[in-house]
Image (cartoon, helix red, strand yellow):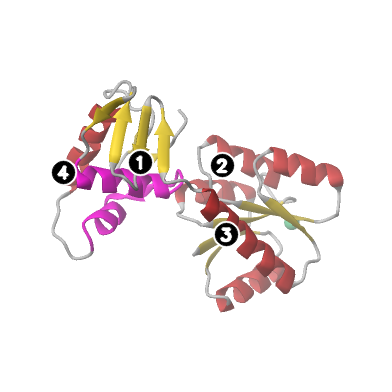
Amino acid sequence: MRILVVEDEPAIALGLKNDLQLEGYDVEVASDGEAASKRAVEGAFDLILLDIMLPKKDGFTICREVRRAGVKTPVILLTARAQETEKVLGLELGADDYVTKPFSPLELRARIKAVLQRTAEERKPVLRFAEAEIDFERGTARSNGVLVELTPLEMKVLESLWRANGRLLSRDQLLNAVWGHGVAITDRVIDNHIMNLRRKLEPAPAEPRFILSVRGLGYRFVTES
Ligand code: CA
């Protein structure tokens, strides 16, 4: 589990980092708003702990940007004061929970676990986007209600992209997730599977709006264009 800690006060950031690492989380720290927004969209995080008062960009702006980019990584806001308006605004902008500073490590840990568990439960095995509906448990796909034949590998590629929650997956990450480690597959093979998925599921395959390329880096999948 990877956590992005966004906090500009070095002492608090270091304390959080040490504490979460002891819990077994993989932790990265961003200390200003711009870096945070960039990393939150690019990095493959399972959770974001987000301070509100930050240099360059505040936590609310970051939250809005991240959600607009289609990233669904759960966000816990770290609010300085128990201000009702801040909490409400944060939740409206797509945050999942908040913790008021100063917080105890115990409380924070409990909140993190609860949020991670909740988001895992909300994940349904049926994916819907545009006119497509894919049932990963049954292994069936439909477009406009008509059955579409997806190969098992195409299913796996799509599921991996979907489970990444809007995050970018490099070709290497896709390769490891679908074909397994140590298998010799060229980038071209992955690109072909992506092309086939677009042809079968995108409303306009030449101008994909859901299965997106990030030039030179890999692919990401969003359920809303
Ligand atoms: Ca701060």
* Crowd tier of the residue under label 3, counting other residues whose Cα lies within 10 Å: few below 14, some 14–19, many 20 or above: few
Give the structural element (helix, strand or loop) at label 2: helix
Q: Marks 4 and 3, how far apart in space?
A: 37 Å
Determine which of the numbered discs, if any, sits on residue 66 in the image: 2
Query: Is 172 one of the magenta-colored residues?
Result: yes
Q: Marks 2 and 1, how far apart in space?
A: 27 Å
**Residue 195: x %, y % from top left:** 22, 34
Residue stretch in magenta? 151-180
> Among all residues in the image, which is located at the extreme front?
138
Going by the numbered disc 1, the residue's amino acid type is Asp
The residue lying at 66 percent from left, 40 percent from top is: 61
Residue labelled with disc 4? 188
Q: Are marks 3 and 2 in contact (CB under 8 Å)?
A: no
Sequence-earlier tag: 4 or 1: 1
* Foreground pick, 29 / 187: 187
The residue lying at 64 percent from left, 41 percent from top is: 94
Going by the numbered disc 3, the residue's amino acid type is Gln
Residue labelled with disc 1? 135
Residue 206: quarter of image: top left
Question: Is label 4's Cβ within 8 Å of ligand 1?
Answer: no
Looking at the rendered image, the quarter that the C terminus falls into is top left
Viewed as shown, does residue 68 lie left or right of 8?
left
Give the structural element (helix, strand or loop) at label 3: helix
Determine which of the numbered discs, if any, sits on residue 117 in the image: 3
> Among all residues in the image, which is located at the extreme bottom?
22
* Crowd tier of the residue under label 4, counting other residues whose Cα lies within 10 Å: few below 14, some 14–19, many 20 or above: few
